[in-house]
Image (cartoon, grey):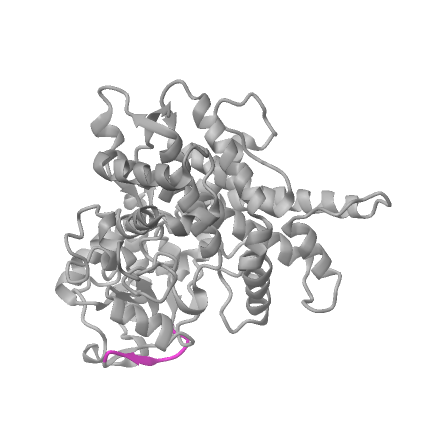
Amino acid sequence: MQVLILLSLAFLASCVVAYSRRRPGGRGAGDLPPGPPRLPIIGNMLQLGQNPHKSLAHLAKTYGPLMSLKLGNQFVVVVSSPEMAREVLQRHGLVFSRPFTPIAVQILGHGEVSMNMLPATSPIWKKIRKIAREKLFSNQALHATRAVRRERLRKLADYVGRCSGAMNVGEATFTTMSNLMFATLFSVEITQYADSDSDSGVNKKFREHVNAITRYMGVPNIADFFPIFAPFDPQGLRRKLTYHLGSLLELVQSLIEQRLRARNAATYRKKDDFLEMLLDLSEGDEYDLSVNEIKHLCVDLIIAGSDTSAATTEWAMVELLLHPDKLAKLKAELKSVVGDKSIIEESDISKLPYLQATVKEVLRYHPAAPLLAPHLAEEETQLNGYIIPKNTKIFINDWTISRDPSIWKNPEMFEPERFLNNDIDFCGQHFELIPFGSGRRICPGLPLASRMLHCMVATLCHNFDWELEKGTESKQLQREDVFGLALQKKIPLRAIPIKV
């Protein structure tokens, strides 16, 4: 693929060299944040590598917490400190409230109604965001759906208890989260655990679609760097995403159509789920909500809800198996508070400070989104005395912030104890720990993700001891990750649960 990109760039060189050497806004380099030297045409593209979050962290050591790059025709600023993150996300939040939408995902009308892609000034964004915040993720809404989450945790514990050998931890947590999202949205389950003989017809394809979407949306795309290539889709990303995103949209469309037909029956009894509430809203006058908007909102929620929490729980188990002393502390706390109950209640979380500290440390050490969703500057502005031209793409490198030795003592060590007896949380106000973002575009699903992360980690640790297959320890516990929208473990964790 790199050969294809370089050949394409060579072909393009004679056409765009004059354009690509222009400074944004016609300004001199002295007005812009410092940054590494740029090659003609491609700028700093080759310096991103396979793991851009790590490459950018290395460059930031030389060029500072506000660093400028040129990626093809794109001018980019990388933020690598809590102070600069606060400037972008809070103090200048409105200026930087527009998300960057990759060309490859401007498909199937998704960018026109997705709350992940619309600017914060859009009436559609405000409407959909308000519905998600108030009707699905508010404390009142989450309290009303706590039984749905409890049942998914019970099924997770039952499945793990049935496993007689090594199991894929990430696959189990993905199944739990995807079933939770579908049960909350549609009152159905779409995936089965690995030992199930059931096949819903989409079971085998669903995880493939979600994983592909999060992977391909995170791949640097030459069409974004050089828009002249967009019609040719040189990496095939638009084609692949059209297939995978289209498949999820078709699945959700079929569930909506089934519900609409059922609602027309005289004997219909209303479901207690999110889709029922959305369809009721669409028939009222308050929100002017269309069925198309409902479909794309549900797909956004499924993708975000299924993948990131599952991956973070897998990383938590990796670290706890690497640090048996930490696992022993957590198990002791759970035993003292929860006792013999197999299911941890959400009301127990506040009584479990070491569990809370463990989840915070996992989110610090393995941030789900190492580069927060990129933003665009709506207008020219100033940050820290530097000019940020209009349409500059802003990356916030949460991975760098989370491992900054000026912020964290021994940042390369996994130490939940660092979060005991302090008030740092991940809710968007402490900019040294912002795995879910902050400001106008903070992840609306944070309250749900927090509940499930704590409860899944607690369920796996409280009910089971864990072993690794002999001879696989070093391989299974490697921390090597795969860059994408969600930071996945490269080699899935397979471990043997032993019922306590």
Closest to the observer, 403 or 394 = 403
User: Residue at coordinates 27% horizontally, 62% vertically from top-left?
Assistant: 432
Q: Is residue 380 magenta?
A: yes
Image quarter where the C terminus lies is top left
Whether residue 218 is situated above or below residue 285 in the rendered picture: above
Q: Is residue 236 visible?
A: no
Closest to the observer, 158 or 288 = 158
User: Residue at coordinates 70% horizontally, 69% vertically from top-left?
Assistant: 286
Closest to the observer, 58 or 182 = 182
x, y percentage for residue 416?
A: 25, 48
User: Residue at coordinates 32% horizontally, 58% vertically from top-left?
Assistant: 12
282 displayed left or right of 408: right
x, y percentage for residue 335?
A: 36, 36
Give the main secondary structure of the magenta stretch: loop
User: Residue at coordinates 22% horizontally, 63% vertically from top-left?
Assistant: 40
The residue segment tinted magenta is 377-384
Q: Is residue 5 visible?
A: yes
Extreme residue toward the left, this view: 62
- Picture quadrant where residue 247 is located: top right
x, y percentage for residue 253?
A: 66, 46
Image quarter where the N terminus lies is top left
x, y percentage for residue 387?
A: 27, 79
Whether residue 22 is situated above or below residue 441 in the rendered picture: below
